[in-house]
Amino acid sequence: EVHVEKQVIKEVQRVDNIPLCSYILGENIIFYADQNLIEVDGIKQNIQAQTSLLLELFINQKDNGYILKEDFIIDKLWPDHSGNDKRMHSAIGRLRLLLRKIDTSFSIINKNGTYQLIIPEKPPVK
């Protein structure tokens, strides 16, 4: 008879008290997408749901250089088809303002119908 031990696997959300959708954006910056929160130097601040969604859309395109097509942004932010270029540019503007307040080395550039999130490289640990 072989004795088999059952392992208990922790729920993903509860592992190390890190929520399900959190991203470390810098040495002292954590983005909690599922809570629409960003924490900088231990201070949490609420961010608009749409701004949070837009930031998460960019982060999810890491393998694609953090690039989003304009029509993709409009489709994701306004699934009811109420979005347009003006509303998208306003949403991008709000995200730019938020990022600039957090760390001036973050930016979003626009070229050829796409937007690209520029995340500063983490300095090497000394």
Image (tube, rainbow, N blue to C red):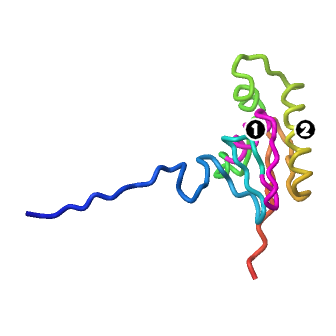
Where does residue 70 sit, x and y in percent of width and height? 78, 32
Q: Nearer the viewer, residue 52 or 93?
A: 52
Q: Amino acid at mark 2?
A: Gly
Element under disc 1: helix
Where does residue 40 sit, x and y in percent of width and height? 81, 57
Q: Which residues are magenta?
A: 39-59
Q: Which residue is mark 1?
A: 54
**Residue 123 belongs to magenta span:** no
Q: Amino acid at mark 1?
A: Leu
Q: Residues within 10 Å of mark 1 (few under 14, many from 20)?
A: many
Q: Quadrant of residue 26?
A: bottom right
- Image quarter (top left, top right, bottom left or bottom right) of the N terminus: bottom left
Q: Residues within 10 Å of mark 2 (few under 14, many from 20)?
A: some
Q: Nearer the viewer, residue 5 or 94?
A: 5
Q: Which residue is mark 2?
A: 93
Up-down relation of residue 40 to residue 81 (above or below)? below
Tell me the residue at 69%/43% (across/down): 33
Left or right of residue 85: residue 74? left
Q: Nearer the viewer, residue 2 or 124?
A: 2
Q: CA distance from mark 2 to mark 1?
A: 11 Å
- Image quarter (top left, top right, bottom left or bottom right) of the C terminus: bottom right
Q: Earlier in the sequence, mark 2 or mark 1?
A: 1
Look at the numbered discs 2 and 1 and tell me whether their residues touch, using CB distance below 8 Å. no
